[in-house]
Structures are given as C-alpha cells and as structure tokens.
Image: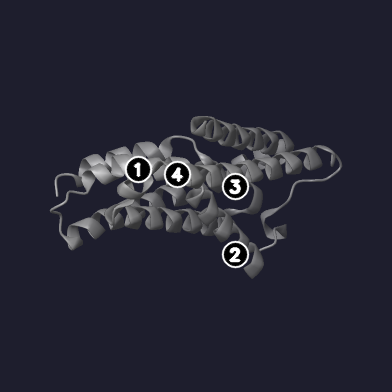
Amino acid sequence: MMELLPLMLIHLGVLISPGPDFLFVAQTSVQRGLRQAFVAALGVVLGILGWATLAVTGLSILVSVRPIHVVISALGAVYILWLGVQLIRAGRSNANKSDSGPVAEGDKVHTVAGYGQSFLKGLFTNLSNPKAVVYFGSIFSLFIQPDMGTFSRYLIVAVVVVESLLFFLLVARTFSFVAVRQFYERNSATIDLITGIVFVIFAVVIAATLL
C-alpha cells in the first residue's frame, strides 16, 4: 500500500506538533512518574484508535454536518478549558508551598485509582480535542478510498495506532529522566501555570472558530 508512508509521515507531523495530548503525557511523566505517563499514553492512544476507526467508517460525513461539528468542538473546548483551570490552580497552590521539597519517584502514589485517573484523563484529553476531529475527518480520511477493502482500512488504523503508541511512550520516557524531573520539581509551579494557560488558550481558540 503506497499510501502508508505518506500517511505515516503526515501523522508523525500531527503528533509532533504541540497539543493537549503531547502536553498531558509530558506533564504526567514529570509530575507523576513514568508508569503513570505510560498509562496516560495508553488512554490517549485508545482515543486515537476510536477516531481512526470512525474515520474508516465515515467520520468525514458526520463532521461535515455543521451542528454536529459545533457540538463536538464546543464540548472539547469545555473539557480542555477545565483541564487548563485545574493546572493553573495546581500551579498557584504549588507556588504557595515554598517549604516543600522535591518528590522522589518512590514517594509517588501508584494506586489502581491513580492509574485509572491517568488513563481516563488521557482518553478524554484526546477525545475532546477538536484537532483530532478535524484531522481524522479530513486529512486522514483522504487516505481511505471508497474501493478500499476491509483489511486495507484496518491496516491503516493499526499502523496509525502503533505509530501513536510508540511516539507517546517515547514522550513519556523522555520527560521521565531524572534531570528533566528535577527541573520540573524546581519549577513545577511555573510549568503548571504555563501549561494551564496554554490549555486555556487552546480552548479559547477552539471557541473562537465556532463563532
């Protein structure tokens, strides 16, 4: 299938471009550790699997209906805004804890509830990202030909999912290095504030496109 390589390159470009998924996995890695970030990455990739599956079954037709597109985008903007506000609050709270020391990897809480929270946040961060709707409903769908067989369609889905999984696991691993984590621990308040503000900006931009 000659279209696989161009699709993989385009998809890699979409993954690399900073967005809610990238920021969430990176922030989870430096704040909550590698294992939590891996789980968050799995949540994000499950969302990508969902979008890709919808794309091969006619997502482009669905999102071409203006009211549906508006509702999906509006819900996504609300969720991303909520995440941004939570990060800003966390940043302000951390800024007031000047006497707190860095958190060691062994001191982080790794519970079933904690993993579940990371997984669901990763999933909902991806599902609520209107950029994913536009990408899978337009650019991605261009690679799905009407005469394409079922095997070819789901081979494309599998390739995109595996590529996404490898990328986000790499992001999680990169931001889990001691030097990166120590940098975060020294600047956690500022980083959370900046990340939260970026999420809020994402939400505002999305809302503005709906007006």
Q: Earlier in the sequence, mark 3 or mark 2?
A: 3
Q: Position of residue 45 (x, y in %)?
A: 43, 55
Give the total number of marks visible in the rendering.
Answer: 4
The Cα atoms of the two marked residues, 1 and 2, are separated by 34 Å
The Cα atoms of the two marked residues, 3 and 4, are separated by 19 Å
The Cα atoms of the two marked residues, 3 and 2, are separated by 18 Å
Label 4 Cα crowd, 10 Å radius (few <14 / some 14-19 / many 20+)? few
Q: Position of residue 111 (x, y in %)?
A: 66, 67
Side of 178 relative to 96 (left or right): left
Type of amino acid at the residue the image marks with label 3: Tyr
Q: Are marks 3 and 2 in contact (CB under 8 Å)?
A: no
* Residue drawn where x is 14% and y is 45% of the image: 2
Res. 116 mark: 2
- Determine which quarter of the picture holds residue 5: top left
Type of amino acid at the residue the image marks with label 2: Gly
The Cα atoms of the two marked residues, 1 and 4, are separated by 9 Å
Residue on which disc 4 sits:
67
Label 2 Cα crowd, 10 Å radius (few <14 / some 14-19 / many 20+)? some
- Regarding residue 195, the answer to whether it shows in the image is yes
Residue on which disc 1 sits:
64
Q: Are marks 2 and 4 in contact (CB under 8 Å)?
A: no
* Residue drawn where x is 45% and y is 55% of the image: 47
- Regarding residue 111, the answer to whether it shows in the image is no
Label 3 Cα crowd, 10 Å radius (few <14 / some 14-19 / many 20+)? some
- Determine which quarter of the picture holds residue 189: top right
Type of amino acid at the residue the image marks with label 1: Ser
Q: Nearer the viewer, mark 3 or mark 1?
A: 1
Residue on which disc 3 sits:
79
